[in-house]
Amino acid sequence: MAGDNERNPDASLDAFWMPFTANRWFRKTPRLITEASGIRYRDERGRELLDFASGLWCVNAGHCHPRVVSAIQEQAAKLDYAMSFQLGHPEAFRLAERLSGLAPKGLDRVFFCNSGSESVDTALKIALAWHRLRGHAGRTRLVGRVRGYHGVGFGGISVGGIGNNRRQFPVQLPGTDHLPHTHVPAEMAFSRGQPEWGAHLADALDDLVALHGPDTIAAVIVEPVAGSGGVLVPPVGYLERLRERCTAHGILLIFDEVITGFGRVGQIFGAERFGVVPDLLCCAKGLTNGAVPMGAVLASKGLFDDFMQGPELAIELAHGYTYSGHPLATAAAHATLDVYEEEGLFAHARSLEQQFEDRLHGLKQCAPITDIRNIGLMGALDLEPVPGEPARRGITLFERAFEAGLVVRTAGDTLALCPPLVTQPDELDMMFDRLEQALVASS
Ligand SMILES: Cc1ncc(COP(=O)(O)O)c(C=O)c1O
């Protein structure tokens, strides 16, 4: 491993305040990546590492895909920037058209932003504004789910259900509430795919409606598979029931597909995999293969048309970003969608799913593990915590994995895995072999 004495003394690590990182821990043993290609990283010492985290759930088509690289390069030389306020550029319109053709039927209008967090805040704002313009201004409540992750904007953390991400910021949106999460180990530990138990947990929405009143909730937001909260797979029938309860109560259903979008669950969106269509769909990450930041919210034409009222010169939605539909992001997204299509990556992900599941569940004996779960090419395992030292096992595993030539994503004592969709079967075996080695070494 790179030690302090091996670092270039000119390259100070002091100034960068790292996000979601224990900064002091990092600086003691910095791990710096300098190159990437396909499923591999190279660090500053020239060591090769397999990327078992797809960047951060985003590099679905593999790093530095030549097609994406050249699309960005060409675009940068042709049109670096054009605002999307009262002006536009053709490729953003073409991308919206393309996405609406790929999305579940009925989601054919696209609002661009720059990240998952922005897509969530955008969707929540659209939901509030939509109810208001339809005369239901009292529908101001927003409902998320315990253990849900919806980014770091104030909207996102308010509906988010991860305590650590909320506690430091005691001022949040008023009028938010949370459904229970769906991970009940006593009923579903070591499930493969969707657990059989738990569809009824969606009925908790009825309790919130009874508690707050019938015309108070604007929207419910959930991830079809909760990702950062630990890969919590929806029980069979749960999303269908939630869809049905939202419709019955006049509440908009928002799917946050920032992780589950673009092939992670073997289809373009979780909505397709689970056969449930939301009213609004948030996406980001795999939209551009992680190469340029971009997010989007998909909505129906009907909802869009509801906004197209009033004086023609009036702005219908007072919302947007300097970089909405940015040319470089747009170029990266087009190239990424080309790659997904031409290389058949969603079907390839489906073909790897059984191997992924078998190898993942085969880790059970390698270390003290209390649960393993998976769907598509996303999976997680919970390590038994060291008493009194939460996250110790997770961090140790991260370190041992790095030593074994593998980058993994740990959060607390949970390990989440998501190989790039381009991974080949022998490479997937190599990732699991290294992980096994790391698990044994860390326990
Ligand atoms: C489901 C979900 N929503 C939103 C976000 C936030 O995305 P970003 O970090 O791009 O703002 C994430 C990030 O991991 C996510 O997993």
Image (tube, rainbow, N blue to C red):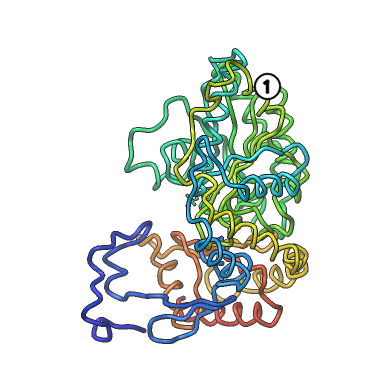
Which one is nearer the viewer's eye here, 376 or 280? 280
Residue 394 visible at all: yes
- Quarter holding the N terminus? bottom left
**Label 1 near ligand 1 (CB < 8 Å):** no
Q: Quadrant of residue 127?
A: top right
- Which residue is at 62% across, 44% downward? 182
Q: Quadrant of residue 429?
A: bottom right
Q: Residue 142 placed where, x, y %?
A: 53, 29
Residue 183 visible at all: no
Q: In the visual, does 403 lie left or right of 3?
A: right
- Which residue is at 55% across, 39% downward? 145
Look at mark 1 in the image and give the residue it sits on.
249
- Which residue is at 64% across, 60% downward? 373
Q: Residue 124 placed where, x, y %?
A: 53, 33
Helix, strand or loop at label 1? It is helix
Which one is nearer the viewer's eye here, 321 or 174? 321
Q: In the visual, does 115 lie left or right of 283?
A: left
Which one is nearer the viewer's eye here, 240 or 121? 121
Q: Residue 126 placed where, x, y %?
A: 56, 30
Q: In the visual, does 139 lie left or right of 247?
A: left
Q: Residue 395 placed where, x, y %?
A: 41, 68
Residue density around tag 1, few if under 14, some if 14–19, many if 20 or more, within 10 Å = some
- Which residue is at 75% across, 51% downward? 273
